[in-house]
Image (cartoon, rainbow, N blue to C red):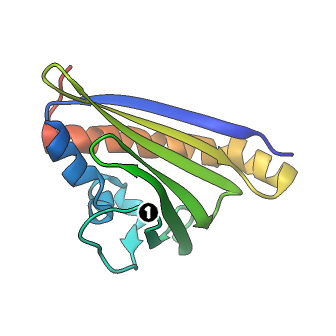
């Protein structure tokens, strides 16, 4: 069985919980914090408010510009505190992404916790070592910078 990886990132942002929730709980804003080379595009219709059971479909181009369909489901939502998306169809054998928001002095603390597993056994493990794990690190580093550009920094 292939390893289950964990990626955790925390960022303090000088906005209030309502502002954070309004931005991060809207899938349409993902494009603003995703590297342009991935050509991220949502294909499902927008909804007014995130809800448990919501299915979101995308196309991304993570490698060599090859389009890849991805489908996630919002499995848990506690308004203003956290939500969880899980891959239903896509590049991973497992993708479970928790988004947590907590008020702190001067803003909010946002924590992303991702558990993921690559498919294809040994080939997936090799791909992870060669580029997938590094690409995820780079995507979250880009996201940190994009969020600072949008909202500023508390550091």
Left/right of residue 152 with respect to residue 127 in the rendered view? left
Please report the residue visible at 66 percent of the width from the left and 58 percent of the height from the top. Answer: 92
- Count of labels in the image: 1
Front residue of 91/44: it is: 44
- Quarter in which the C terminus is drawn: top left
Q: Position of residue 1 (x, y in %)?
A: 87, 46
**Residue 112, quarter of the rendered image:** top left
Please report the residue visible at 51 percent of the width from the left and 70 percent of the height from the top. Answer: 65
User: Pointer 1: residues within 10 angstroms few (<14), some, or many (20+)?
Assistant: some
Q: Is residue 85 above or below residue 145?
A: below
Please report the residue visible at 54 percent of the width from the left and 42 percent of the height from the top. Answer: 114
Element at label 1 = helix
Q: Position of residue 23 (x, y in %)?
A: 22, 53
**Residue 51, quarter of the rendered image:** bottom left
Q: Position of residue 66 (x, y in %)?
A: 56, 73
Front residue of 137/23: it is: 23
Say whether residue 37 is visible.
Answer: yes
Q: Position of residue 76 (x, y in %)?
A: 46, 52
Front residue of 10/141: it is: 10
Front residue of 137/116: it is: 116
Say whether residue 66 is visible.
Answer: no
Left/right of residue 27 with respect to residue 107 in the rendered view? right
Please report the residue visible at 53 percent of the width from the left and 75 percent of the height from the top. Answer: 67
Name the residue that disc number 1 marks. Answer: 38
Left/right of residue 64 with respect to residue 16 in the rendered view? right
């Amino acid at each position: 069985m292939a390893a289950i990886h964990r990626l955790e990132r925390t960022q303090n942002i000088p906005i209030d919980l309502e502002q954070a929730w309004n931005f991060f709980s809207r899938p349409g804003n993902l494009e603003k914090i995703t590297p342009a080379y991935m050509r991220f595009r949502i294909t499902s219709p927008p909804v007014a408010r995130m809800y448990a059971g919501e299915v979101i479909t995308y196309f991304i181009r993570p490698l060599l510009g090859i389009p890849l369909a991805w489908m996630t489901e919002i499995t848990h939502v506690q308004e203003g505190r956290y939500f969880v998306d899980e891959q239903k169809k896509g590049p991973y054998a497992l993708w479970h992404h928790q988004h947590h928001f907590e008020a702190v002095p001067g803003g909010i603390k946002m924590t992303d916790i991702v558990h993921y597993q690559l498919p294809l056994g040994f080939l997936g493990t090799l791909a992870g070592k060669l580029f997938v794990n590094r690409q995820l690190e780079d995507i979250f580093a880009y996201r940190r910078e994009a969020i600072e550009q949008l909202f500023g920094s508390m550091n």
